[in-house]
Image: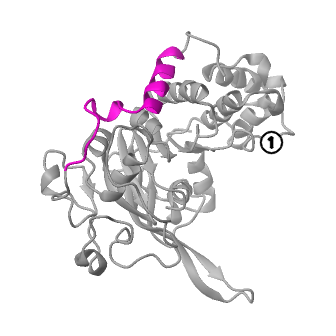
Amino acid sequence: MTAPEAGADGAILSLDGVVRHFPVRDMLGRRKGAVRAVDGVSLSVREGEVLAVVGESGCGKSTLGRLALGLEEPDSGTVRFRGDDLRALSPAALRERRRWMQMIFQDPYGSLDPRMTVGRAVAEPLRLHRIVPRSGERERVAALLARVGLRPEHADRWPHEFSGGQRQRIAIGRALASGPRLVVGDEPVSALDVSVQAQVLNLLQDLIRELRLAFVLISHDLAVVRHIADRVAVMYLGRVVEQGPADAVFASPRHPYTRALLASVPGAGTRGAVLQGDLPSPIAPPAACRFHTRCPHAEEICRMQEPPLVVGAAAAATPAHRAACHFRDTLPAAATPANGHRGGGERLARLQAFFAAHRPGTGNAA
């Protein structure tokens, strides 16, 4: 069974105007509103590319990841995998497509069934999609474990016998078992220690490069995003407020929310107004610009008119860099680290040092 071809625009995954609202009901079951988790998002990711989706908790980024894989059905808009609208597929065709789309979950302790040996867990996608005969399962599982830095004999052990980093390696091996073209990582390293994060991220980078995977990284950790992402989409209350190449977004953020996120990273070397107050309710988000209630630059137009997500004059040299802000071209210059999006910040420096020290062959897998 061969993977379907990419869409006409070369994208493995494309979302166009995707909306997903979750109804809120009272004690009698009557609908009283809706959580506007994702509210008109358009994104795409190509083969071999890492798209990072960032934002505060509750901004809708995890729901967006589930929509991308067909685990949630959008209320409106289209989700296309290699040109095929997932909602238009029959159940059988959708199941076949799911072989090529996989997810790596945040919690390495909860994502593995404690009643299954590691070998059985990794072999489950092989059986589900009938990729190899039963007689070839053990050999394929051993190859998958070796690819993620584990040993063949680990197949006979149970999940509780492994560290958090090793469990996440197992989860990555299971995700690779079906030969996917698209992988969504929902905070795949946030539950791990920094040294283990470095090893797992190095592994993911190597796999993305070798297998030409389209990878969607959902994260709140900007140090990780700076290191691994090719493009960044910043979400706020269900909408993308800034999107563009990672270098451009980190070196010259054009939306006040992006600047506030960067300024909130301790020691990141980026100065700006730190966010005040809590995220407004996604049941009743502010009208017009949703960020105006927390924005230090907000004016009357921000309360009256929703800004489009477009390229500003200041970003003419980077036409893929877009921001949804009325003042995208007139905001004061952001104070960012001199060495661009790859540098700056004590935490990022420590993480990068671990990246260098824990490349394959320089230490034991955690």
Where is mark 1, residue-wise?
113
Residue found 46% across the figure and 54% down from its top: 55
Which span of residues is magenta-colored? 333-358
| Position of the N terminus by quadrant | top right
Q: Which amino acid does label 1 sit on?
A: Asp
Residue 115 vertical position relative to residue 327 in the rendered view, above or below: above
Which coloring applies here?
A: one colour
Q: Which of 194 and 102 is in front in this view?
A: 194
| Residue 48 visible to the viewer | no
Say few, some or many: other residues with alpha carbon within 10 Å of mark 1 (under 14 / 14 to 19 / 20 or more): some
| Residue 161 % position (x, y) | 82, 27
| 172 to the left or right of 285 | right
Position in image of residue 230 (x %, y %): 36, 38
Tell me: 328 left or right of 97: left
Q: In this view, does 3 lie to the left or right of 177?
A: left
Query: Measured from the top left, where is residue 78 in percent x and y?
Result: 43, 64
Tell whether 192 sits left or right of 283: right
Specify the farthest residue to the right: 115
Residue for point 24% across, 74% down? 299
* Quarter of the image with the C terminus in it: top right
Q: Does the magenta stretch include residue 98?
A: no
Q: Is residue 354 magenta?
A: yes
Q: For residue 66, say whether it is visible.
A: yes
Residue 250 in percent (x, y) is at 31, 42
The image shows residue 183, relative to residue 241, as above or below, that is above
